[in-house]
Image (cartoon, rainbow, N blue to C red):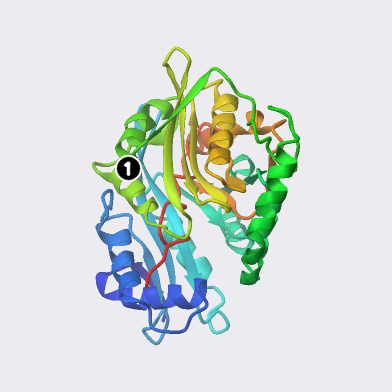
Amino acid sequence: MSQVRLLESADIPAIAGMFQRVFRNDRAAPPTALVDYMRQHYLEAPGCDPEIRPLVHVNGEGRISGFVGVNALPMVHNGRRLRAAICGSFMVEERESDPLAGARILKAFLAGPQDLSFSETASEVSMQMWTRLRGVVLPQYSLDWVRVIRPAAFSLSVASNRIRSARLAAPFARALDTFYRKRMSRGEQRWSAVPEAGAGQSGFQVAETDRSGFAAVVDRLMMQFPLRPEWAEGQLDHILTDAEQKPDEGELVYASVSARTGTLVGAFAYYAKAGEIGRVLQILPLPGQAGPVIDCLIDHACKRGLSGLRGRTQPALLEAMLGRRIAFVHVASTVIHSRDQTIVQACRDGQGFFNGIAGEHWSRLIGGRFK
């Protein structure tokens, strides 16, 4: 008889092996670094809640055949404190012998003690499972956005994911991009590139900062969201420290944006690696300042030599992104579940702060290295 139960420390090696097989297509034994990381990530990190933990599915023969990764996140909604659960790695093996294992483990997770459950990486299959269990898809949170900066280098970066030798053309791509972008006027809007002279935003100052400097302004910039994280002690610092340890993504750059008067209007964090497409972890503008903050981010990435930017949408950013030659693509869905319909409606209305540092993409399980 199969069962679903809470993850125990002794389960971690088996879970790491399943992660290696399912998500990394590697049947070798999981590296010790991956085993250690998953134990720390799911059972020992700041904010861990003994009642809101990952779940494992154990088949009739006593083997672990399924897993859902869970991280607890304290939140607040209009002054009311909530317990949220982020659904991360969701994997099932032996589907042929037990096709309902995934549904059972997800149902058990959603029946947990948390006030709100959500995921920003739901595949088509898991999204359907969520909705059958009264989960709700949030379309305005479910798009990835892309901005091309250097078209030749951008194309080369995409191609090199499949053909490594494509990188040999990098010098030619740089010369072509410089020639093309210098013939664009400052502030000119094209889908294909950003001018060498920049996006055209003036009157704002960008200052690079460090992890603690970025963390110091996060809560102030999140106050506009009625539903937002209320980090446990040390949790935000842990998230940012974790996010920094992705060398293949590049350096995690933090910056604040101020008006000419010195007043803070926003901040952003993104991965910078010259010639590559930078992953944006977070954009945090004050209300009405999303446009200038996005322009400052793009200009900053230009100066860093990036070929483009890619990030996750939030409703507070969508209007400002329109007209800035930003393209949108659907890769995975943000889904939520709550027994409290006021919370569900707040999420539908775009009042929640999800994705990025309040999600899953900061974790080393997405884009990290364990060798």
Q: Which quarter of the figure has residue 35?
A: bottom left
The x, y position of residue 360, in whole percent, is 45, 52
* Between 319 and 266, the one nearer to me in the picture: 266
Q: Residues within 10 Å of mark 1 (few under 14, many from 20)?
A: many
Q: What's under tag 1, amino acid-wise?
A: Leu
Residue at disc 1, secondary structure: helix
Q: Residue at x 60, y 26 (%)?
A: 291
- Image position of 9 (left or right of 309): left
Relative vertical location of residue 203 with respect to residue 16 in this rendering, above or below: above
* Between 324 and 356, the one nearer to me in the picture: 324
Q: Which residue is mark 1?
A: 236
The x, y position of residue 135, in whole percent, is 55, 50
Q: Residue at x 62, y 48 (%)?
A: 307
The x, y position of residue 290, in whole percent, is 56, 27
**Image quadrant for the N terminus?**
bottom left
**Image quadrant for the C terminus?**
bottom left
Q: Residue at x 65, y 29 (%)?
A: 319
- Image position of 165 (left or right of 95): right
Relative vertical location of residue 359 with respect to residue 55 in this rendering, above or below: above
Relative vertical location of residue 320 with respect to residue 309 in this rendering, above or below: above
- Image position of 136 (left or right of 9): right
The x, y position of residue 217, in whole percent, is 36, 29
Q: Residue at x 23, y 41 (%)?
A: 233
> Which residue is situated farthest in the bottom direction here?
61
Does residue 175 appear anywhere in the picture? yes
Relative vertical location of residue 157 with respect to residue 354 in this rendering, above or below: below
* Between 115 and 213, the one nearer to me in the picture: 213
Q: Which quarter of the figure has residue 309?
A: top right
Does residue 137 appear anywhere in the picture? no
